[in-house]
């Protein structure tokens, strides 16, 4: 049973490769977070280790269960560690970690049929680590599968990209997310509609929001912060950005979620200005949006959306987060 949803084209090609025993030795999955890259990597890890004869993971055998629970000794996931105090090891996948996992590729699988190594956030591989990986990719082994996950394939060295079979993951349609939340996560229809609107096509975020009340609580707190910051003095704005920059070291995705939220909020202010209420994403906050739209220039909002986009891009490309965030806040429109 494949757990990957909404990426039918990619899954169809992978099933076809599996059925004729022609999987690549290395894959590169690119796309925004929460669209199923890790899910498909785990599906593939199960498929190549599952003893069933059906060219798909059965989901119930010992191999599949151990991989799903993260307890399979031949399946390793290596990524940036959140919450570490050493700034280098937070933002970079270093040579020592990579050497350690690649050492496994010289050994026979211990409990399964195939060693699977997943690099989560492969854009964070250091140059030395990338070169070590390149050596392994140049000498592929039948019993090793390497899967790189990244937000954008342009962040991966050409020499590595050219040795991987590459798939680009798209965001998921809102309707698919809404249906999944109702059918598989017991969401009521109003909550499912709101969460699907806010998800930006990320099923990963949507499931977190549907199953953990803190996600929507955090959104409320972040929106209140946004409203306060728009009215705040420059000193207060810089204080807030300083907090975000420190937080970025511990929780990159959390800070990026804040910026996505700002962008979505600004988009809604623009839509509201065009009197197009049914397309509002923050549909539970229309009163707050209307209130704010009276005090803010829509042209300033539109140019700020571009600034937020460029900031997210900069953060994804490892620029100094504090500088990027400070530059963004200087361009924040002021509420009158
Ligand atoms: Zn199985």
Image: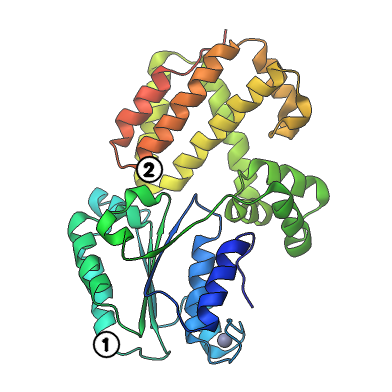
**Residue 13 screen position, x and y as percent:** 55, 69
- In this picture, is 80 found above or below 69? above
> Looking at this rendering, what residue extends furthest in the left direction?
128
Q: Is residue 69 visible?
A: no
- Tell me: 295 left or right of 186: left
Residue at the image point whose x is 58% and y is 35% from the top = 221
Point out which mark residue 316 bears.
2
Q: Of residues 73 and 83, which is closer to you in this image?
A: 73
Residue wearing tag 1: 107
Q: Earlier in the sequence, mark 2 or mark 1?
A: 1
Q: Of residues 188 and 54, which is closer to you in this image?
A: 54
Answer with the quarter of the image where residue 310 lies.
Answer: top left
For the residues labelled 2 and 1, say whether their Cβ atoms are less than 8 Å apart. Answer: no
User: Tell me, what colour scheme is on the image?
Assistant: rainbow
Residue at the image point whose x is 59% and y is 69% from the top = 12
Answer with the quarter of the image where residue 242 lies.
Answer: top left
């Amino acid at each position: 049973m494949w757990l990957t949803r909404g990426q039918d084209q990619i899954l169809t090609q992978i099933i076809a490769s599996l059925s004729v025993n022609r999987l690549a030795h290395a894959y590169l999955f690119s796309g925004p977070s929460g669209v199923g890259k890790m899910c498909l990597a785990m599906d593939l890890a199960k498929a190549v280790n599952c003893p069933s004869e059906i060219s798909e993971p059965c989901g119930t055998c010992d191999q599949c269960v151990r991989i799903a629970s993260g307890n399979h000794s031949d399946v390793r996931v290596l990524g940036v560690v959140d919450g570490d105090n050493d700034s280098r090891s937070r933002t970079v996948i270093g040579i020592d970690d990579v050497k350690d996992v690649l050492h496994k590729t010289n050994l026979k699988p211990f409990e399964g049929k195939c060693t699977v190594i997943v690099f989560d956030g492969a854009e964070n591989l250091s140059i030395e680590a990338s070169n070590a990986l390149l050596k392994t990719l140049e000498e592929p082994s039948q019993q090793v599968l390497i899967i790189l996950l990244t937000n954008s394939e342009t962040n991966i060295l050409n020499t590595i990209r050219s040795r991987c079979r590459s798939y680009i993951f798209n965001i998921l349609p809102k309707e698919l997310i809404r249906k999944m939340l109702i059918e598989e996560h017991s969401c009521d229809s109003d909550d499912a509609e709101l969460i699907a609107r806010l998800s930006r096509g990320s099923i990963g975020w949507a499931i977190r929001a549907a199953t953990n009340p803190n996600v929507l609580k955090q959104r409320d707190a972040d929106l209140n912060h946004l409203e306060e910051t728009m009215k705040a003095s420059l000193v207060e704005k810089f204080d807030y950005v300083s907090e975000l920059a420190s937080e970025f070291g511990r929780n990159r995705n959390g800070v990026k979620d804040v910026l996505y939220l700002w962008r979505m909020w600004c988009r809604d202010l623009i839509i509201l200005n065009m009197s197009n209420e049914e397309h509002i994403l923050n549909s539970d906050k229309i009163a707050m949006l209307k209130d704010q739209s009276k005090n803010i220039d829509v042209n300033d909002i539109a140019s700020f959306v571009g600034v937020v986009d460029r900031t997210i891009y900069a953060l994804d490309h490892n620029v100094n987060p504090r500088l990027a965030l400070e530059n963004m806040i200087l361009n924040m429109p002021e509420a009158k």
